[in-house]
Structure formats: C-alpha cells, structure tokens
Amino acid sequence: MKIALMDSGIGLLAAAAAVRRLRPDADLVLSSDPDGMPWGPRTPEDLTGHAIAVADAAAAHRPDALIVACNTASVHALPALRARLEPGIPVIGTVPAIKPAAAGGGRVAIWATPATTGSPYQRDLIARFAQDADVTEVPCPGLADAVQYADEQAIDETVAAAAALTPPDVRAVVLGCTHYELVAERIRAALQRPGRPPLVLHGSAGAVAAQALRRIGELPGSGPAPASTLTVLLSGREERLPRAALTYAEGRLLAAVSPAL
C-alpha cells in the first residue's frame, strides 16, 4: 500500500505521521513545493497550477490515494485535483475540524492563515456546522512560515500575537492550517488559562489519515515487523526530508523509516 501526501511545505508531516501510526507498513510519498511556497498569497488560479504540479509529481509514483494535506489547497484546488486524478487515484482533502469543535459547546476559536480567515469557504463551514456556537476567527500571519523554517523566535512571536487575539474564555481551538499541528502544544501553552478547564485543540491529521484508508478499503493495523519506505519530493525532485522537518516529532517519526532513494 502506498499513500501520497501533498502540501506547499512541511505541513503534511502531521497527516503523514498519522498515516504511519495507523499503518506502519504503508509506503509514503511526501510531495511539497518549497520553490513555490507560500501558496496563500497566490491567486486561486496560480495556486491551483502549483498544486497540480505537486500532485502530478506524487501521482507519478502510483500511490493508492493522495491526501491534500493543506487547507489552502483544499479550499482552492481540490475540484481541479479530483477532476485530474480520480477515479484512478482517490483524492482526500483537508477540512478544518469546525464541526467537532462546535459540538462540544462553549466558545470556539479558529486559528488560520490570513488567506483562509474570513474566506467564504470558512464562513460557509461555520454557518453549516457551528451556527449555534460562539466562534472567533483568528488570523495568524507568519505562523505557517515560522513553522516551515523551524524559526523558534518567530514561532513564539506569532503564537503570542494570535493568542492575544483569542478570547480568554475560549474552550476549543480549531487548527485551520496543517502547519499549526506541528506546534500544537506550544499553542496550548500560550492559551491555557490557570483555573480553566483544559483547552481542547482540534486538528485534522487523524481524521484525514483515517479517511484515506477508508477510501481505499483498508483498516488500521499491520502485521509484525512492517517494512515501508519514504519518498520525499521537493518541487518534483527526490531528496531527503528537509532539516527543519526533523525539528518536529512527526518528522523524526517519519525519518525512522527507510528512504526510497
């Protein structure tokens, strides 16, 4: 079994690690676009062109499914990617976990990139799944870039800036960019208030990984001593995981398998 994941950068690590935990025997193809990132400031048409190029690079390795592990690409390019690759390769998009966050009641914050915050796409999800919830949209300029390059000072500064915009009585936070899941505990530490119930963070990685398995008729679990490979594509070039990826637990987990080079 082979699962491919695509993103502008290393935000795909969270979903890839989730797939690895569910199926340690799965071969993984990680396709990103360091030469073209960030995708957020691009026009929808330009972003779609980059997303198609990254998806085509992954598709050349004949995966059983492709996870679009990027909220921005899922917003703008998912229909084009599905039209291009399905039914041969099932394409699974990433949707912010607004529905489960709102189901718990109380005040909810959605941390997302400036391009996604306030977008018709996000507003539609709020209207459909969180109509009765008290939702605050929090733009996080610079946070995805800081995570991408493992810039510790920039991560601290951008998390602190977003935390300052987040209501103090928030009960749950939706991580509306896949990069943010790599620093989830730092976000929790910045938001958790003394004396309040533990903050609940809602990412998408686990749900997306499980959906990919469902789409191809597979179940979690594997036999003993699985042998699996990792293929890393950086703007179409086969290379190793970027050094910044190893800063995060998810990257180190993936680096433990054999590179397919």
Image (cartoon, rainbow, N blue to C red):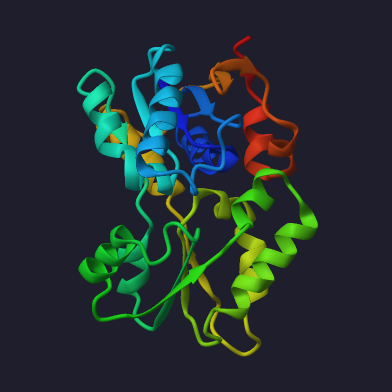
**Rendering coords of residue 98 (x, y %):** 35, 64
Asked where in the image residue 121 lies, by quadrant, the reply is bottom left
> Height in image: 201 above or below 253?
below
x and y, in percent, of residue 259 in the image: 64, 16
- Which x, y percent locates residue 52? 38, 26
Relative height, residue 164 to residue 187 (above, below): below
Residue name at image x 73 percent, y 38 percent: 244
Q: Residue 55: x percent and y percent?
A: 40, 25
Left/right placement of residue 116 relative to residue 234 reads left
> In the image, 41: left or right of 97?
right
Figure quadrant of the C terminus = top right
Q: Residue at x 71, y 59 (%)?
A: 155
Residue 222 visible from this viewpoint: no
Q: Quadrant of residue 232?
A: top right
Up the image or down, 177 lies above or below 82; here it is below
Looking at the picture, tell me which residue is in the foreground, 90 or 222: 90
Residue shown at the point (68%, 37%) measured from the top left: 245
User: What quarter of the picture does the N terminus occupy?
Assistant: top left
Residue in the foreground of this view, choosing between 50 and 54: 50
Residue 168 visible? The answer is yes
> Residue farthest to the top?
261
